[in-house]
Image (cartoon, grey):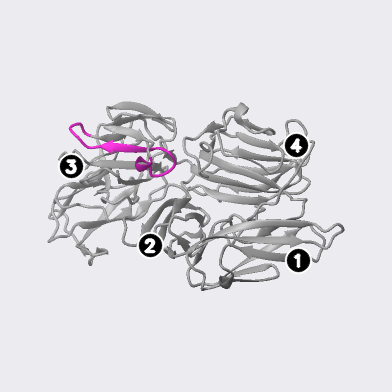
Amino acid sequence: MQKAWTKGAFGMKRWWLGSCAIAWAGAAAGQAVLPTGHSGPWSNLALLPAGWTQTELTDYAVNYDGFGRGAAKFDSTNDALRIDLSGTPEEVTYWIQHNVASGYVFQVEESVDGEEWSAVATYAGVGLPAVAQPRTNRLLAASRHVRFRYETKTIGNVGLDGVDIRGWPTNFCVTFNRRDGFSVQTGTVVAVVATARNGAEPCEMAWDSTLGAEHWSASGDTFTIEASAPRGDYVAWASATDSGEPIQAATNSVRFAVTTVYAIVLAPATHGMLATEPAGYAAGGETVLVLDAPEAGYQLASLTVEPDGEEPFHLNGGRFAMPATATTVRAVFEEIPPAGSYVVDFEDADKFTYPTTNVVLNGKQWELAQTLIGTASEDVIAGFKSARLRDGTNAPSLTLLEDLTNGLGRLSFKYRAAASAIDPVDWQAEYSRDGGTNWVRIGRPFAPPALDVVQFFSRGVHVTGPVRVRIVRGRANVVEASRLIVDDLVATPYDGLGPTLIEDVGPGTVPGEYEIEVPGGYGLARVEGAEPVLGGCGPWSNLTAGVHYGVSNATVAVWTVPGARQWLRLYLVPLP
């Protein structure tokens, strides 16, 4: 059960803006004085704040919160970060994401004595975003220890960054309901509410501002920015006094900008929802946080930001600078890989050059020919590394050199053209059941669009093991400027006979170039073809065996198709 201050269903950070001064004295040695926070590095114990310790953590190259160094990498069961506190905590905030993880249990815990721990937030296979997001959890006032722990690793790692723990303020102070530096759309009315804390009631509030007096009004705890306010950057001050003996006084300020803001549109998504902070609108250049909430059994696969009139761009992080135009944010959610899947995210290997070299990816040998593992932002789809294949005089390929002994149910991966790509070309995925001697194409050839938008390849294969997979160029023509980026390859284990329909499988523009191996345990019932039309295909009709296609053993070869019919689907029947 997760204990958190949330907004809606998104675990959105609870903003308390305007800090209260906190003074703590006599902190015990080896304890963190509140408030306390850290944003990396994590692996070097000497560089952690007082009261902070870690077990087996390493460092990612990229940070999540935009401060300090890289995120902490939890890559083994029982990896942990612990903070021992000297004062009364209120809440803990942190940035977190999983990196192609499934079947995991990740705990945020608290303890009074450092011996008995209770859960603050439990992420058991779900709940961790695939793109870093902030989370905030309330802490018990009696707790003096906080711990982040990778309780169970099955597949994938967890990244953590920007950990901040705030204590309960004990002095008289003023806080606001708006974050510092918020934006106001010109011509609108916006209210700011101040709260006096830790004083004797009733409290009185007085306001002042650098905004002209004719453009604002105040009543008690509320400061109102009027629609007549001109563009500009301003500050408002709230000064509170209480009714105690002696009287206490406190002042705080909040900055705001009156400017043009632009609409943030959330594209409809299946198997999940999105939210942004701020919601609905943001000023040009303002930082927008994107928060996802996948359905059970799903995870975020990609985020794309689409400014009106500008090129869309892939978002490999939980925030972006708002363009000076209305902007759509689009999410794609994918199923979490089932147990027993073989997952390659390229985070566990390095290869900085294109020439052919073998590397180990998630425990298995791969041959990377004309392929490097990129780390630059323009080379990465998810996480911090992706494979980059270069077309040229030597055939580029990404080839598994060891068998998947549990067979292959479905092969899927993310791909897009590199930023430097000029000519999109066709590529194809293949599998082999004889140790790499012969290869069978999986589905249609694919060509990434020129834009920097993530695409998805996902096709059912449904063959028993042993089996290998690879990604190669589709045709023999060489396009020197072509680059393909691949990430998050998932091979699910053989899952039974599979569906009785294989749809959208070929044959491409040249008749006779397409072959498919019928999954084990099935025979071919019939083959249908359809002509491509905008947004899909036209009516399906039967193709004739011996005229349009032939069957040899378990392989279907398409020889020709009537007219321009380039879409195929194969109906299968279980063998007796």
Say which residue appears at 23% left-offset and 44% top-offset: 553
Task: Count neighbours of disc 2 (C-alpha within 10 A) and say few if under 14, some if 14 to 19, many if 20 or more.
Answer: some
Residue type beneath disc 4: Gly
Q: Nearer the viewer, residue 515 or 150?
A: 150
Query: Sequence order check: which comes first, mark 4 or mark 1?
Result: 4
Query: Could you classify mark 3 by the number of other residues whose Cα lies within 10 Å: few (under 14), some (14-19), or many (20 or more)?
Result: few
- Where residue 569 appears, as percent x and y from the top left, is 26, 57
Front label number (2 vs 1): 1
Is 27 situated left or right of 307 in this image? right
Labels 4 and 2: the sequence-earlier one: 4
Q: Nearer the viewer, mark 3 or mark 4?
A: 4
In the foreground, 473 or 268: 268
Distance between mark 3 and mark 4 Cα atoms: 62 Å
Residue drawn 28% across and 27% down? 356
Amino acid type indicated by mark 2: Thr
Q: Which of the marked residues, 3 or 4, is nearer the chain's N terminus?
A: 4
| Residue 117, position as x, y percentages in the image | 73, 41
Query: Magenta segment: does it hold 159?
Result: no
**In this figure, which residue is indicated by the disc labeled 3?**
475
Residue at the disc numbered 4: 114
Determine whether the residue tagged by mark 1 lies in a helix, strand or loop. strand
